[in-house]
Image (spheres, helix red, strand yellow):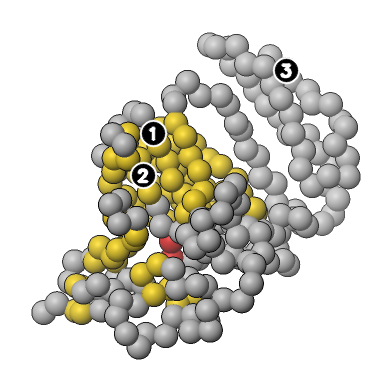
Amino acid sequence: MDVSCPENYHGSNFYTCQVDLVPGQRVDLKLVYQPTGIKNDILIRFWTDTIIPYQSAFIPTYRNTYPFNPDEFEGAAYRVWYTCVQTEGEIIITDCQGKISKKFDAQQYLPVQYVADQPAFIFAPFFCDNQGMTDSCISGSENKYDVQFVGGLFTFAQSFFCRPGVGPINSNCTNQDSYGDYYCNRDQLPYKRGPFGQIPDCLQRGFLAYDLPNRSYYCVCYHGYSGVSCEQQDR
């Protein structure tokens, strides 16, 4: 089966094409383009409908304003409600180049939790950048990210744009680590991170889990570390 796309997207950085598929029928898609002499990356993605029921949303971490779109101060705290129960779920966040972000929470692996008897995955906020790699991405996509969820054999992806943060950040939380994440002055426990100091800092020695009754995150330390911020190295 040959498929051709209408050539009515000139002048755009993003070209799209819709193909009607028939179950059991093989379709070969070919990309034909004219090189411009300039080195360009080409990223091809496919989206299809799914019969597996799930819901996903980004949740604010500071102001609790709705509807919410991720920004560089609030972060992108991703939640997935998935009826096909899996014991564990994972997200991977890629930047405008299609590469896994260098930020610490770009990859998260969590056990399932239950919210109102529904299985859910509550991931920690990922603090994106509104002005990312401006010199290496397609113009207009510098602040574009993709989050991919994997639960067992089921996976899906969702794109989002990181909006500018609003207002001044906490003056005690202007430090940046090697991952590019903000963290607050470490003068008292529990340590905090994020532009407003809204989540615990596990010092890259653990990961954040969500406490449903208290609606707050807490550190789960990796083997060999303990403390509310994983600040203690066990002997």
Secondary structure category for the residue under label 2 = strand
For residue 130, above or below residue 203:
above
Secondary structure category for the residue under label 1 = strand
For the residues labelled 3 and 1, the Cα–Cα distance comes to: 36 Å
Residue 204 in view here? no
> Which residue position holds label 1?
82
Q: From the image, which quarter does the N terminus lie in? A: top right
Left-right relation of 28 to 211: right
For the residues labelled 3 and 2, the Cα–Cα distance comes to: 41 Å
For residue 178, above or below residue 212:
below
Residue drawn 73% across the image and 17% down it: 2
Q: Amino acid at mark 3?
A: Asp
Q: Amino acid at mark 1?
A: Tyr
Q: Choose between 85 and 43: the one closer to the eye.
A: 85
Q: Amino acid at mark 2?
A: Phe
> Which residue position holds label 3?
2
Left-right relation of 119 to 50: left
Residue drawn 61% across the image and 33% down it: 46
Q: Characterize the local packing of mark 2: few (<14), some (14-19) or many (20 or more) Cα atoms within 10 angstroms.
A: many
Residue 111 lies, in percent from the top left, at 28, 46
Left-right relation of 5 to 230: right
For residue 156, above or below residue 209:
above
**Mark 2 and mark 1 residues within 8 Å of each other at the beta carbon:** yes
> Which residue position holds label 2?
121
Residue drawn 34% across the image and 28% down it: 84
